[in-house]
Image (cartoon, rainbow, N blue to C red):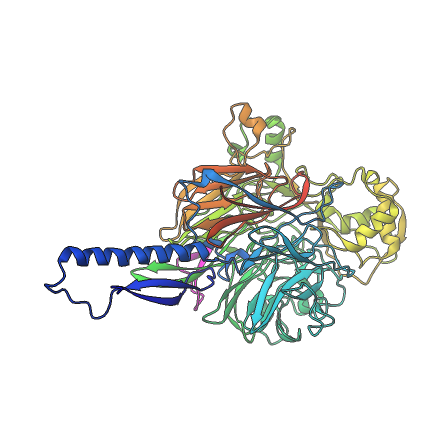
Amino acid sequence: MSLCKKEYFNFSISTKGNINPQPILFIFPPKPLHLTNSIPMKTWLFILGICLLGLMLGFTAWQNKVNMDWPSYHGANDRNHFSPLKQINPSNVHRLSLAWDYDAGGADTSTNSTQMQCNPIIIKGIMYGVSANTQAFALDAKSGVELWKTHIQVKTNSTTSRGVSYWSQGKKSRIFFGYGQYLFALDAKSGKPIPSFGEGGKVNLLSGIQREGSDEYVSLNTPVTIFKNLVIVGTRVSESATALLGDIRAYDAISGKLVWTFHTIPRPGQYGYTTWEKYNYQNLGGANSWMGMALDEKRGIVYAPTGSAAFDFYGGNRKGDNLFANCLIALDATTGKRLWHFQTVHHDIWDRDIPAPPNLFSLTIQGQKKEVVSVLSKQGFMFVFDRVTGKPIHPIVETPFPASDIPGEVAAKTQPIPTWPEPFTRQSFFEKDINPWASNSDEIKKELALAKSGHAYIPVGKEKTIFFPGTDGGAQWGGAAVDEQQVMYIPAKENPVYSALIPNPKSLKLTKAGSIYQQQCMSCHGENRQGNEDGSIPSLLQVQKKYNLKSFLQLLNQGRGRMPSFQHISLEQKEAIWAYLHGDNVEVKASNLLSVSDYLMTGYNRWFDSKGYPVSRPPWGTLTAMNMQTGKKLWQVPLGEYPELMAQGIPRTGTDNYGGPAVTAGGLVFIAATKDEYFRAFDRKTGEELWRYKLPAAGYASPSVYSVDGKQYVVIACGGGKLKTKSGDHYLAFSLN
């Protein structure tokens, strides 16, 4: 006769990750349990001990079977990059080793121009991601064995992809992902397009955002946000005067039909219309939500950040604060109705987009729990708001800044500066901030003395103007992680960038090839066609070594990576650019159908010394732990290194970086992101580096953390292709050996 009773329960835990319920054996004493004189106390203690042991064994058995998902971009709809898994921790992370290596294919290793920025999702033991040539795939997340992969050949703009999104209803399950200008719906089991969605399984996102004078470049490179049966979409558009509208849209997840649209450049009668000039909704574009959104599922609120209006660096044709550019917008996810907004930059003329998705978490304020939403900035600030009302948690002060000296430009008189938390990057650049061992420091000092520099929000002028941090951060698209103790982990960079404005040489009839280059190419490749020193934008000085006329025209028509398509200019003008790059400044027919700006910028010029290192004093890349209860840094460490500098005795400097972290309840922060091609694990309490692994190509992406059959894994996409690093196409997963 047994003294204990066996019962089975389907047991699950409420966490930010998804756990698949498993039947668990629990052992209980018989009811009622009475201590009597007939059974000695020692016997009862023995019986209770056996029951407790059974309970522990049952729980251990459950742990060994449990699957913990990474079900959405950055881990969950709160975008906190957090996993509650604890199997891998500071005491054993040194045992982390390669579990599997998946070759996704598609890398262009001849020009090193492809990337993989994908943060893969894991649902019920299946991993979904995107290859270097933007093909979606599904893997067995335990073994890395491919289950399916798309072979989409639709003609569209080239793009990079940061991942996919998952939707299910009953027995139906779909994967949504962006392929250039198209939103695709795939059967999650087979990878085949759903014929009943849109037109043959896809929706053309160009439809509805065109305007007079615009180009046709639109790309869906960040995973969509899904609320019930709605697929909420923001897009990337060009940053030139020809940019498309940046509207935020929601589509029916089953049919692909448009459900609602939020106009980020308001129409007459809509809130915010008076913050623009009268016809800007017809003749301007941009103000788009390219970076990804967060979702409060309980309240049905989607939080959508936006970037600047186009053209980014001159706003003489869009006088006013320009709502809803550079805003965090809280929208009713069901209807698209604006609930509240906050503008982080007024009348942006610095390309200061909100660079990453928001984070949703809770803080204890004066003894009360308050649910908040935060966004990072390229300037190194963080803005934190009450999630429901939009009221700042701490004061944000409107601070005066200088006026512009460019004719026609009217810079905003003030900009909002948070008083809390403290900035996670430096905020000024003076002579004292020059790298003390820069190879040509005297020359750098002379250039700085002639430039406009010093603090944030200096309007770009005709002379060299310094942005610090640079035009892509500060914070970047990888975003921040938040753990269960309200500590935020932020990767950032502190590299100066310079530019200037020059008048746009407009012509009604004929135009020179050099003018076409200035209008279409100079903002990225620079006034002297040298590209960026770090290789993120290639030089065009020897373009003939990589391309012939045919392949060059194909590149202009399709675009590649961050380079948009130039289908909006004529074949004659494209051939004129080719001629100009070969030294022939030919004259061709001008185009009067496209929007133009009165001024052009001379490029996103990252400032390096003569040996190719940033001219600013290190650190150049950082990982910061911010206590969100106090608003103070817990620690900040350099992220990445230059081995040749360390060999000279120079302390770790950090490097430029792209990609986000993942933080675990086990006490670790995982991040790749760096130019040195390492994947690292840090102690989340101290910032000490505990583990590193040399990747086959740099991991300019955010890692995902999950478990299958009780075993914890961390996976990273190794796509490289930026910062003069080689391109790759492998996904690497790690577990304890």
Closer to the camera, 728 or 18?
18
Residue 62 is situated, as x and y percent measured from the top left of the image, at 41, 58
Residue projecting furthest to the left? 37
Across the whole image, how many numbered discs are drawn on residues? 0
Query: In this rendering, would 61 be left or right of 720?
Result: left
Query: In this rendering, would 218 be left or right of 386?
Result: right
Closer to the camera, 312 or 547?
547
- Residue 177 sits in which quadrant? bottom right
Residue 413 in view of the camera: no
Is residue 464 depicted above or below 394 in this figure? above
Quarter placement of the N terminus: bottom left
Query: In this rendering, would 680 be left or right of 459?
Result: left
Closer to the camera, 189 or 422?
189
Residue 282 is situated, as x and y percent measured from the top left of the image, at 70, 69
Is residue 609 depicted above or below 305 in this figure? above
Q: Which residues are magenta?
A: 383-396
At 86% from the left and 39% from the top, the residue drawn is: 583
Q: Is residue 314 magenta?
A: no
Residue 508 is situated, as x and y percent measured from the top left of the image, at 85, 58
Dominant SS of magenta comes to: loop
Residue projecting furthest to the front? 1
Residue 479 in view of the camera: yes
At 76% from the left and 55% from the top, the residue drawn is: 565
Residue 675 is situated, as x and y percent measured from the top left of the image, at 60, 38
Q: Is residue 393 magenta?
A: yes
